[in-house]
Amino acid sequence: MAKREMGKLLGGALGLAAFGGLIAAPQPAAALTINANFTNFGSNADEQNVFDAAIQWWEMIITTPFTFNVTVTRSTLGSGTLGQTSAFTENGAGRPVSATVQMGIRSDWFIDPTPHDESEFDVDSTEPPVFLAPPGSVANGLFDYLTVAKHELGHALGFTVAYSLFSAQVGAESGGTRPFGKNPDGTPMVIATLGPAADGTHLVDSGSQKNDLMVATLPQSMRRLQSELDCQMLSRAFGYDCSTTRHIPKPPTVFLLAIALLGLAGLHAAPRLRRTAV
Ligand SMILES: [Ca+2]
């Protein structure tokens, strides 16, 4: 059964400085298998390589054994749209089985030649942790292709009301937000807040959800990782065995060391992020 809703990730703008440093290197081990059909990447093997890395991250985080098929295309999207996902298909048990991801054809991508590390970025103190490209660095002023690929795959693998089991967890919209999370008897047990239906299926970008991978907009110069909340939501809807803690190093050691060093240098004030959704 093909589903209609499209998940989109929109570009935004930002200006900032950053601090700290962290390298996250996932280790290979997959129970989920994602088969990708790249349809028109042609000579753009560098983009395909980064998308493959995004696939590998999800395969490492979700250890429930099942196979998912994704068609990936390079597409001319609106100037403010970085990627979008559609053609969601589920099986008789409601589990996602396939979808189509469109990645924008753009000149302002950061195509990471080493997509399994964050060495081009500095860590930011927000939770979930995000990475920011310092002024003058190779990823500064560009949109991170890896982040968009992970975001769109998040939709493909379940994060959309186009899938019946995910939709069943979503409450009525009120004041522009929708609660996510219910007990087996249907009573609310809210674990997350989604934005309005008109914006697709995305987390509200505030509070503990700020800068989550699954919010609707992405600033330039920013890399996001999958969060434990993303996993909890997918687990609630589909029963996935999903945890970022298996594969994403948390920042404590390096991060706290960076804070200490910057504190000694009198540079401990964290920069504020300015964001403009488009
Ligand atoms: Ca890298």
Image: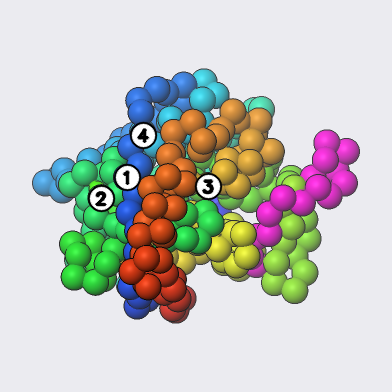
- Viewer-closest of 190 and 85: 190
Instruction: Return the disc, 4 or 2, that comes first in the chain's sequence.
Output: 4
Crowd rating for badge 1 (residues with CA inside 10 Å; few <14, some 14–19, many 20+): some
Crowd rating for badge 4 (residues with CA inside 10 Å; few <14, some 14–19, many 20+): some
**Tag 2–tag 1 contact (CB < 8 Å):** yes
For numbered disc 3, what is the local secondary structure?
loop
Crowd rating for badge 3 (residues with CA inside 10 Å; few <14, some 14–19, many 20+): many
Q: Is residue 116 left or right of residue 148?
A: left
Q: Is residue 104 visible?
A: no
Instruction: Return the disc, 2 or 1, that comes first in the chain's sequence.
Output: 1
**Magenta region, residue range:** 182-196
Alpha carbon distance from label 4 to label 3 = 14 Å
Q: Is residue 38 left or right of residue 234?
A: left
Q: Position of residue 88 (x, y in %)?
A: 52, 43
Instruction: Return the disc, 2 or 3, that comes first in the chain's sequence.
Output: 2
User: Which numbered dot is residue 227?
Assistant: 3
User: Does the Cβ of the disc 1 residue fall within 8 Å of ligand 1?
Assistant: no
Q: Is residue 30 visible?
A: yes
Query: What's the colour scheme?
Result: rainbow
Residue lying at 37% horizontally and 72% vertically, measured from the top left: 267
Which of discs 2 and 3 lies nearer the camera? The answer is: 2
Residue lying at 69% horizontally and 48% vertically, measured from the top left: 167
**Where on the picture, by quarter, is residue 107?**
bottom left
Check the image and name the residue furthest to the left.
Answer: 43
- Viewer-closest of 272 and 156: 272
Q: Is residue 137 left or right of residue 143?
A: left
User: Which numbered dot is residue 278?
Assistant: none
